Image (cartoon, rainbow, N blue to C red):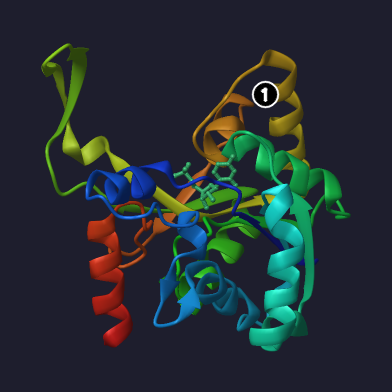
């Protein structure tokens, strides 16, 4: 059994860029290339998976015009990442297509494990990677998730904002994180079905759920943040400093 990690890193980071341009600053590069302590977030994230002895190879989906530059950057500044087998593939218009391209480029056996992890979650830990791999082997599909601490409302969007239509019992809510891990056959079937039906999800688990396979949840971490807005960058710098 081998473990392949897919890192979708082909996003434009529009939320980060629009915040920068609203402040009159030059829009930042895609958020996965924003630097934390002089190193792109994506490289911080990759190093977490390189450190895992269980991980065999890593497939990164990038925008076409960023592939060559990133390869050169790894060779120059992050040779340690290339200790693992690293494959760079072209991403798609949406996250799901970026992951689909990486799946297509992956040669895996049905019972190999595929982990998908956001490029912009650099604070994932070795323990969490291990627990998701272990649960994915046991159940066929498993994700990291954290309980909701806020009360969750369902809303209807209005011109001025939103109005509440329902309150969802908090005990039944988990906030999905990554890594999300799957047996290769389970993930492949879910993606094939989603493509055939034209279904688009915001994470891989949603595709696997609709294909009828149960997805287990292992305890994620509040520190495993998805760097999305400039406020997240401030938190990331704080975590890194510690
Ligand atoms: O934009 P979003 O929050 O969905 O991004 C989550 C992850 O998916 C990021 O790591 C981003 O780079 C990636 N992504 C991608 N291809 C896209 C859009 C997002 O690989 N077309």
The relative height of residue 47 versus residue 42 in the rendered view (above or below) is: below
Secondary structure of the residue carrying tag 1 is: helix
Can residue 94 be seen here? The reply is yes
Q: Is residue 214 left or right of residue 185?
A: left
In this view, the residue in front, 145 or 86, is 86
Specify the quadrant of the image occupied by residue 144: bottom left
Q: Position of residue 147 (x, y in %)?
A: 26, 50
Q: Quadrant of the N terminus?
A: bottom right
The relative height of residue 64 versus residue 127 in the rendered view (above or below) is: above
Q: Is residue 145 left or right of residue 139?
A: left
Q: Residue at x 51, y 64 (%)?
A: 33
Q: Position of residue 66 (x, y in %)?
A: 68, 57
Can residue 54 be seen here? The reply is no
The relative height of residue 79 versus residue 91 in the rendered view (above or below) is: below
Q: Is residue 115 left or right of residue 143?
A: right
In this view, the residue in front, 52 or 101, is 101
Instruction: Characterize the local packing of mark 1: few (<14), some (14-19) or many (20 or more) Cα atoms within 10 angstroms.
Output: some
Q: Residue at x 22, y 46 (%)?
A: 148
Q: How many marks?
A: 1
The relative height of residue 78 versus residue 45 in the rendered view (above or below) is: below
Residue bearing mark 1: 194
Q: Position of residue 8 (x, y in %)?
A: 61, 51
Q: Residue at x 33, y 64 (%)?
A: 221
* Label 1 CB-ligand 1 distance < 8 A: no
Q: Residue at x 29, y 76 (%)?
A: 237
Q: Is residue 115 left or right of residue 112?
A: left
């Amino acid at each position: 059994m081998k473990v392949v990690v897919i890192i979708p890193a082909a996003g434009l980071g529009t939320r980060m860029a629009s915040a920068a341009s609203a402040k009159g600053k030059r829009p930042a590069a895609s958020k996965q290339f924003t630097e934390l302590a002089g190193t792109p977030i994506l490289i911080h994230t990759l190093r977490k998976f390189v450190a895992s002895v269980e991980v065999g190879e890593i497939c990164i989906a990038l925008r076409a015009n960023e592939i060559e530059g990133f390869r050169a950057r790894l060779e120059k500044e992050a040779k340690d990442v290339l200790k693992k087998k690293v494959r760079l593939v072209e991403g798609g218009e949406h996250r799901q297509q970026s992951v689909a391209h990486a799946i297509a480029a992956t040669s895996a056996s049905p019972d190999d494990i595929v982990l998908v992890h956001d490029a912009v979650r650099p604070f994932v830990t070795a323990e969490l990677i291990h627990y998701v791999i272990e649960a994915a082997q046991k159940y066929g599909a498993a994700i990291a998730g954290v309980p909701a601490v806020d009360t969750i409302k369902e809303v209807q969007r209005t011109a001025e904002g939103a109005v509440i239509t329902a309150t969802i019992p908090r005990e039944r809510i988990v906030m999905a994180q990554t890594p999300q891990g799957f047996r290769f056959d389970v993930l492949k079937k879910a993606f094939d079905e989603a493509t055939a039906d034209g279904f688009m999800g915001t994470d891989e688990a949603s595709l696997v759920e609709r294909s009828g396979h149960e997805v287990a949840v292992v305890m994620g971490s509040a520190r495993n943040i998805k760097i999305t807005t400039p406020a997240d960058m401030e938190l990331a710098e704080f975590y890194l400093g510690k």
